[in-house]
Amino acid sequence: MRVLIACEYSGAVRDAFTALGHDATSCDLLPTDSPGQHHQGDVFDIIDDGWDLMVAHPPCTYLCNSGVRWLTSDITRWPKMIDGAVFFRRLLEAPIPRIAVENPVMHGHAAKIVGRRQDQVVQPWMFGHPEKKGTGLWLKNLPPLTPTDDVKEQMAGMPKSVTDRIHYASPGPDRWKLRSTTYAGIAAAMADQWGTPAWLELEATA
């Protein structure tokens, strides 16, 4: 399949699809951190280029529920929130047959603009990473992800510096990159479950 990974500079999801033989391209305003097919620029410049599947990771700064409190103390965030939610909705409504848009759990103001809540919330510990970070998936013609390696029980007794590594990440110039990069286990599940022909063949014969 031709797969577009929108708003991704890390190459994590792109490389997972590429490893399974798909023609995957990442796109972001930033250059890619990992060698591979990458379009540096506006995703809507290439949105109509005949993709079979898109996995998108739009910015979450003004959309996530954890930051909603700042809307009441800083009115300058409102137009940025609206722009972010409209951008998110444009991705979800793009003319591509199968779409997944990923973001942290969204606050109500943004969800109202987007038009609906997420279809699924996944955690890193469902895919082999002993960490907590709830991530919502808005899906179009794609099945929910099935956990591949549930390690939740193994997290009992682990320090928060491990299970909440992202939350407790030290301030620094690369902190935002650490917090936004897709976990390898989740990226592999996306590629395997959404890129595997098995369910596509079932869909074709339904």
Image: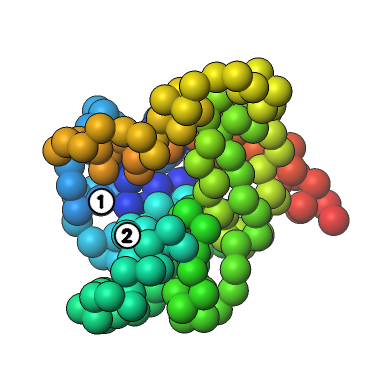
Residue at the image point whose x is 17% and y is 36% from the top: 172
SS for callout 2: loop
The amino acid at mark 2 is Thr
Relative placement, left or right, of 2 versus 59 is right
Looking at the picture, the colour scheme in use is: rainbow
Position of the C terminus by quadrant: bottom right
Q: What label does residue 134 carry, if any?
A: none
Q: Decide: is 27 above or below 32.
A: below
* Among numbered discs 2 and 1, the one appearing first in the sequence: 1
Q: CA distance from mark 2 to mark 1?
A: 16 Å
Residue at the image point whose x is 38% and y is 69% from the top: 69
Question: 17 or 80, which lies in front?
Answer: 80
The amino acid at mark 1 is Asp
Q: What label does residue 28 carry, if any?
A: 1
- Residue 108 position, x and y percent, is 51, 75
Question: 148 or 76, which lies in front?
Answer: 76
Q: Decide: is 127 above or below 206.
A: above
Residue annotated with mark 2: 61
Kindly tell me whether residue 46 is visible in this rendering.
no
Q: Residues within 10 Å of mark 2 (few under 14, many from 20)?
A: some
* Count of all numbered marks drawn on residues in the image: 2
Residue at the image point whose x is 65% and y is 37% from the top: 193
Relative placement, left or right, of 76 versus 53 is left
